[in-house]
Image: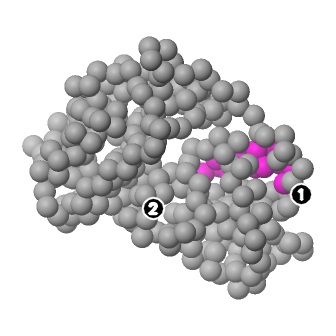
């Protein structure tokens, strides 16, 4: 799959023009997928064209390939997904973005936000069909004015056989946690799932559905708050601005950001400074547990 993307990158650059910077990031040890090369190329080109149309004044287009594991929690909210190891192709742009209603309909045949005569509305539905036919899944994360990330998940293969699924569990070594974590997330399902994972690992969890709620909780909670786990982009206030405000009253607060955007996309958007701690959604319980422990255990 890495060969497909790398081989197409020059063609993509020619297709979308000089005002869009194209980057390809391939993680080492990338797994193999079992899919038709021509169809994969069609997926890449369709998503690239879609990204170009969202950036009429130019911007950045990033292709990322990495190995990921989708767990039971992810599969529970994506009925077409079998838990297990996948290769992720993430295509991120710095364009106009989409609202929640558009994201819900974006893969429907003939649905288009373009003016009459400028698009058939079949590009993304075609992509969806190819990905599903290949045994995979496609998801979209976007914020109006902040750009879009499409995530294509294809099952990972070793030779002709699928890579066996690893047992999903929180590392027992993480169960002795005792710190307090403030979780700031505007999506209720992710907020509750994160709470369950952290409580199971032993943390005390404070939940905030918005930056305003987080400020209120941080101001009224009588004990220490050791870590804040916050989304990067939320209605009303970005995560970094919230962090800046809370650090005035709680200078010892550790911070871990999370987002549906990839870390490379976050960097290109200029939403986070380099070197901050970051966790990409969706995450497994084990990945969340490891990252939270890592941030808390890093010498201050």
As drawn, 32 above or below 103: above
* Badge count: 2
Main structural element of the magenta stretch: helix, strand or loop? Answer: helix
Q: Is residue 45 left or right of residue 214?
A: left
User: Looking at the image, can residue 206 be seen?
Assistant: no
Magenta span includes 34: no
Q: Is residue 282 left or right of residue 285?
A: left
Q: Which mark is residue 178?
A: 1
Q: Position of residue 276 (x, y in %)?
A: 57, 68
Residue occupying the point 21% across, 40% down: 8
Span shown in magenta:
186-203
Residue occupying the point 13% across, 48% down: 15
Q: Position of residue 298 (x, y in %)?
A: 73, 66
Answer few, some or many: residues within 10 Å of disc 1's Cα (few below 14, many 20 plus, some between 14 and 19): few
- The residue nearer to you, when weighing 216 against 63, is 63
- Secondary structure of the residue carrying tag 2 is helix
Magenta span includes 199: yes
Q: Which residue is mark 2?
A: 266
Image quadrant of residue 240? bottom right
- The residue nearer to you, when weighing 88 against 136, is 88
Outermost residue on the top side: it is 160
Residue occupying the point 68% across, 54% down: 291
Image quadrant of residue 20? bottom left
């Amino acid at each position: 799959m890495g060969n497909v993307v790398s081989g197409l990158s020059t063609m993509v650059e020619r297709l979308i023009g000089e005002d869009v910077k194209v980057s390809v990031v391939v993680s080492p040890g990338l797994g193999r997928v079992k899919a038709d090369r021509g169809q994969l190329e069609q997926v890449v080109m369709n998503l690239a064209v879609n990204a170009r149309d969202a950036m009429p004044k130019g911007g950045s287009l990033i292709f990322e390939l990495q190995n990921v594991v989708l767990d039971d929690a992810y599969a529970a909210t994506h009925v077409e997904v079998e838990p297990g190891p996948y290769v992720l192709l993430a295509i991120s742009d710095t364009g106009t973005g989409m609202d929640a209603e558009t994201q819900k309909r974006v893969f429907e045949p003939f649905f288009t936000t373009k003016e009459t005569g400028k698009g058939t509305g079949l590009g993304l539905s075609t992509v969806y069909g190819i990905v599903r036919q290949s045994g995979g899944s496609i998801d979209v994360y976007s914020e109006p004015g902040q750009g879009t990330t499409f995530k294509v998940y294809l099952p990972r293969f070793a030779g002709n056989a699928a890579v066996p699924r690893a047992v999903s569990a929180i590392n027992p070594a993480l169960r002795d946690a005792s710190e307090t974590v403030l979780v700031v997330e505007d999506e209720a399902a992710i907020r509750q799932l994160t709470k369950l994972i952290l409580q199971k690992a032993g943390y005390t969890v404070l939940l905030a559905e918005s930056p305003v709620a987080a400020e209120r909780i941080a101001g009224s909670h009588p004990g220490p708050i050791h870590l804040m786990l916050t989304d990067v982009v939320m209605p009303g206030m970005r995560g970094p601005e919230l962090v800046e405000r809370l650090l005035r009253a709680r200078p010892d607060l550790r911070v871990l950001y999370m987002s549906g955007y990839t870390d490379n996309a976050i960097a290109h958007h200029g939403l986070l400074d380099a070197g901050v701690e970051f966790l990409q959604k969706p995450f497994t319980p084990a990945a969340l547990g490891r990252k939270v422990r890592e941030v808390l255990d890093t010498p201050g």
